[in-house]
Amino acid sequence: MYEIKVPSTTKSAPGVATEGLGKRYEDIWALRDLDLQVPAGSVLGLLGHNGAGKTTAIRILTTLAIPTTGRASVAGAPQSGIFCILGLSTTLIPPRARPTVV
């Protein structure tokens, strides 16, 4: 059996925190200067237009992408592979199906 040690958090430590987080792909910034503090135990929805950087932010927080600038932490721990274990997830909600008029 594997033993996973999750860092303990204090009430002052946010569940998710980012400071100046950014991701650049060659000449294009997919995410720029994201400052975020989400209290532990909270639920956060990211809303925005296409290309706003929502998916990029989640990919960085779940360690699927490496930030170009800034830093991120979950449960007080710096970005590491343990984020996926702590319960961060991505859910895509498809647009409502509309009936076709024939």
Image (spheres, rainbow, N blue to C red):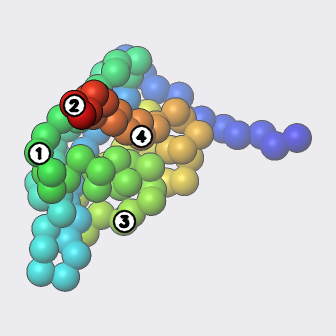
Task: Report x, y in % for residue 89.
Answer: 46, 38
* SS label for mark 2: loop
Q: Nearer the viewer, residue 11 or 99?
A: 99
Residue at the spot of label 1: 49
Give how far apart the Cα atoms at labels 1 and 2 are.
28 Å
The answer, for residue 16, to whether it is visible in the render is: no
* SS label for mark 3: loop
Task: Report x, y in % for residue 78.
Answer: 41, 49
Residue at the spot of label 4: 90
Residue at the spot of label 3: 66
Give how far apart the Cα atoms at labels 2 and 3 are.
46 Å
Nearest to N terminus: mark 4 or mark 2: 4
Q: Nearer the viewer, residue 75 or 86?
A: 86
Task: Report x, y in % for residue 84.
Answer: 54, 44
* SS label for mark 1: loop
> Of the residues shown, which amino acid type is indicated by label 3?
Ile
Mark 1, Cα crowd under 10 Å, few <14 / some 14-19 / many 20+, is: few
Nearest to N terminus: mark 4 or mark 3: 3
Residue found at the far front of this picture = 102
Residue at the spot of label 2: 101
Image side of residue 31 versus residue 99, left or right = left
Give how far apart the Cα atoms at labels 3 and 1 are.
22 Å
Image side of residue 87 versus residue 75, left or right = right
Residue shown at 28% from the left, 38% from the top: 17
Nearest to N terminus: mark 4 or mark 1: 1
Q: Are marks 4 and 3 in contact (CB under 8 Å)?
A: no
* SS label for mark 4: loop
